[in-house]
């Protein structure tokens, strides 16, 4: 199982934004993680569309959390960010290309494993990930 880079960067962005006590910029996030500015622009747009962050334009603008970290369930967030989280092609009827799919028992086992993965994520919130705020801030060079 592997989450997409988009989801990974989205989670990282939320961690960074939540750690900041003031607003931040896309440049702040990309410099902290050493990732592409172009990717982050799309991610910030999507996170704002989901209502998790708010973006303020202008000279004194920036990015702030719109939702409390305690209310951001990781399982629900991953499900929103990964709408086509198919472990194998037969999970998606349009991409299914295996001749044994109608009788294959592996599909059921993999579906059970994926459900367990999502169930575990559903037990945690973004606040759980932020429990060690001081250490995270040091690694991300956020002044507290």
Image (cartoon, grey):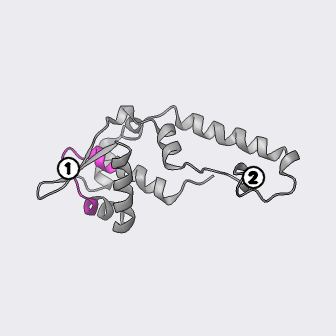
In percent of width and height, residue 39 lies at 39, 64
In percent of width and height, residue 49 lies at 36, 48
- Is disc 2 placed on a helix, strand or loop? helix
- Disc nearer the start of the sequence (2/1): 1
Q: Nearer the viewer, residue 98 or 68?
A: 98
Q: Which residue is mark 1?
A: 23
| Figure check: 6 above or below 75 | below
| Figure check: 79 above or below 140 | above
Magenta stretch bounds:
16-28
Residue 36 visible in rendering: no
Magenta highlight on residue 24: yes
Residue 13 visible in rendering: yes
Q: Nearer the viewer, residue 25 or 131?
A: 25
The picture quadrant where one finds residue 141 is: bottom left
Q: Residue at x 34, y 61 (%)?
A: 41
In percent of width and height, residue 33 lies at 36, 61
Q: Which residue is mark 2?
A: 90
Dot 2 alpha-carbon crowd within 10 angstroms: few under 14, some 14 to 19, many 20 or more: some
Q: Residue at x 43, y 35 (%)?
A: 125
- Is disc 1 placed on a helix, strand or loop? loop
| Figure check: 36 above or below 2 | below
Which tag is nearer the camera, tag 2 or tag 1? 2
Q: Residue furthest front?
A: 94
Numbered-mark total: 2
């Amino acid at each position: 199982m592997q989450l997409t880079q988009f989801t990974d960067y989205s989670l990282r962005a939320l961690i960074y934004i939540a750690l900041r006590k003031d607003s931040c910029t896309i440049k702040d996030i990309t410099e902290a993680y050493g990732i592409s500015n172009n990717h982050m622009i799309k991610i910030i747009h999507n996170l704002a569309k989901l209502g998790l962050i708010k973006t303020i334009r202008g000279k004194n603008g920036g990015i702030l959390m719109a939702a409390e970290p305690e209310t951001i369930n990781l399982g629900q967030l991953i499900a929103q960010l990964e709408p086509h989280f198919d472990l194998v092609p037969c999970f998606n009827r349009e991409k299914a290309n295996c001749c044994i799919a109608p009788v294959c028992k592996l599909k059921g086992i993999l579906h059970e494993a994926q459900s367990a993965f999502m169930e575990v994520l559903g037990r945690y919130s973004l606040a759980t990930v932020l429990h060690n705020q001081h250490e995270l801030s040091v690694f991300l060079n956020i002044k507290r």
